[in-house]
Amino acid sequence: MKLELIFCAICVIGSRAANLPSYITPCSRSLAINELTECVTTEARRIQPEFAKGIPEFGLEPIDPLPLDDIVANAGTFIIRSKNLLLKGLKKMEIREVKFNLEKNTGSMKLFGNMTFVGDYETDGAIVLIPIKGNGKISVKCLDTNILIKYKLRKIKDPNGVDHLETYDIKQSEQYGRVVFHLTNLPGGEAIGNTINQVMNDNWKDLIKQLGPPYTKATANKVHELINKLYSNVPFDQLFAL
Ligand SMILES: *[C@@H]1O[C@H](CO)[C@@H](O)[C@H](O)[C@H]1NC(C)=O
């Protein structure tokens, strides 16, 4: 009986130790908010390349490029459906700040950089009265983009009664330096296609305001799904030491 207990204690310690990847150093949850933010931001930057490559032992796929579900967005009568979407660039996005307020159970993340959505599109409707019904390849380059993601935190217990962090109620907003659209195979031939791309790029601010949210929402949700998968593999007590 005693031996069993000791063995069990060892296996628990053993499995817990194996849970924490070597590149994660826990931040102390007793740090003041500013210091905790600094610590977590540093850790997040350290994890970013590993996270980008994927962490097979946690069942995490690479996040760059990040496959996204199909998205439907519209600007007025212009409807665009995107399929086989990939987001490129997350591994190089600069993590400006990652904040956890463990008392209020809130957090936020600030990212900056360039990212590009590429995939297949299908459009319907019109842009500035030019009818656009077609399909082809789409690329949306978001340059010098500031992203702010806010979320709530809670702890959930795994089947062994161990607490894990989870983020939920994710809200994001972004400010773009510039956005460059490129759609291939637009109807009416190359000259008209170029004109349509030009019109879209001349009006990128209005367009992205309307077309952007479904894309960024899908991205934020996907990234948080993966972050939560990471959390589900690492006990809260190891992520935030005493
Ligand atoms: C984003 O891309 C633009 C154009 O290629 C480049 O000038 C800029 O330096 C890039 N920004 C970052 C943060 O990498």
Image (cartoon, helix red, strand yellow):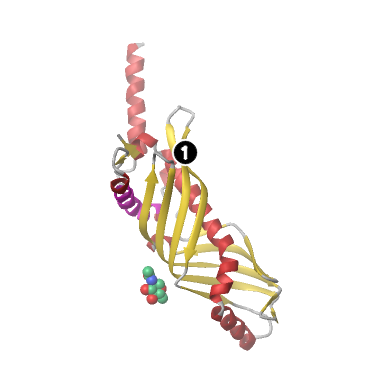
Q: Residue sitting at 34 percent across and 22 percent down?
A: 9
Q: Image quadrant for the N terminus? A: top left
For ligand 1, give the image quadrant. Answer: bottom left
Where is residue 136 drawn, in percent x and y? Answer: 63, 73
200 vs 58, nearest the viewer: 200
Where is residue 164 drawn, in percent x and y? Answer: 43, 36
Report if residue 175 lies within the magenta region: no
Up/down of 188 relative to 217, above or below: below
Up/down of 201 relative to 79, above or below: below
39 relative position to 136: left or right: left
Where is residue 238 drawn, in percent x and y? Answer: 34, 36
Secondary element under disc 1, as helix, strand or loop, is strand
Q: Residue sitting at 35 percent across and 16 percent down?
A: 5
Q: Residue sitting at 39 percent across and 39 percent down?
A: 103
- In the image, which residues are magenta? 37-51
Where is residue 220 drawn, in percent x and y? Answer: 50, 55
Q: Is residue 54 visible in this depiction of the protein?
A: no
Q: Residue furthest top?
A: 1
58 vs 191, nearest the viewer: 191
Number of labelled discs?
Answer: 1
The answer to which image quadrant residue 208 occupies is bottom right
Q: Image quadrant for the C terminus? A: top left
9 relative position to 148: left or right: left
Q: Which residue is mark 1?
A: 154
Q: Residue sitting at 61 percent across and 63 percent down?
A: 83
Q: Main secondary structure of the magenta part?
A: helix
The answer to which image quadrant residue 68 occupies is bottom right
Report if residue 45 lies within the magenta region: yes
102 vs 89, nearest the viewer: 102
**Mark 1 Cα shell of 10 Å, populated few (<14), some (14-19), many (≥20):** some
